[in-house]
Amino acid sequence: MLTTSKSLSISGQSSISGQQVMNFSATIDQSNGRSNITQAVLNKDLYDSNKTEVRKDAADFTDLVYDQEDKMAEADKADTAS
């Protein structure tokens, strides 16, 4: 039996002086609204010397994912109420 699911993927990068320092990736399962967020440091030296800025980017990415989760939950409530 075939089982399928839909998900929303979001990706982002934190860069310093045009060089990528960290990659971000998130997947939100559209059937249950659960998300999975991953981060990968690409340049440890730039990360170590710019932690405040890179961590701010990481927090902004997480906030963006949470905002999308909330929008999906609101749309699901509206569909259920209809």
Image (spheres, helix red, strand yellow):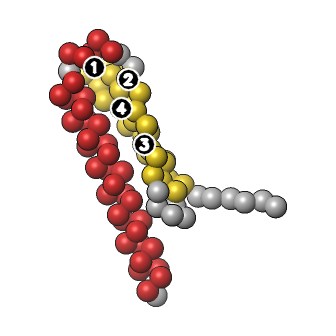
Q: Residue at x 21, y 24 (%)?
A: 51
Name the secondary structure under disc 1. Answer: helix
Q: Which residue matches tag 4?
A: 13
Q: Quadrant of residue 13?
A: top left
As drawn, the label of residue 41 is 2
Three-letter residue code for mark 4: Gln
User: Real-space Cα distance between discs 1 and 3?
Assistant: 19 Å
Name the secondary structure under disc 4. Answer: strand
The local crowd at label 2, few if under 14, some if 14 to 19, many if 20 or more residues have their Cα within 10 Å, is some
Three-letter residue code for mark 2: Val
As drawn, the label of residue 56 is none
Sequence-wise first label, 1 or 3: 3
User: Real-space Cα distance between discs 1 and 2?
Assistant: 7 Å
Q: Position of residue 60 (x, y in %)?
A: 26, 43
Sequence-wise first label, 4 or 1: 4
Q: Position of residue 31 (x, y in %)?
A: 54, 64
Q: Residue at x 46, y 87 (%)?
A: 82
Q: Which residue matches tag 1?
A: 47
Task: Tell me if label 4 and label 2 are in contact, CB under 8 Å.
Answer: no
For the N terminus, the image quarter is bottom right
Three-letter residue code for mark 1: Tyr
Q: Residue at x 25, y 29 (%)?
A: 54
Task: Tell me if label 4 and label 3 are in contact, CB under 8 Å.
Answer: no
Residue 1 visible in the shown view: yes
Task: Tell me if label 1 and label 3 are in contact, CB under 8 Å.
Answer: no
Residue 18 visible in the shown view: no
Task: Tell me if label 4 and label 1 are in contact, CB under 8 Å.
Answer: no
Residue with the most extreme top position: 45
Q: Position of residue 15 (x, y in %)?
A: 29, 25
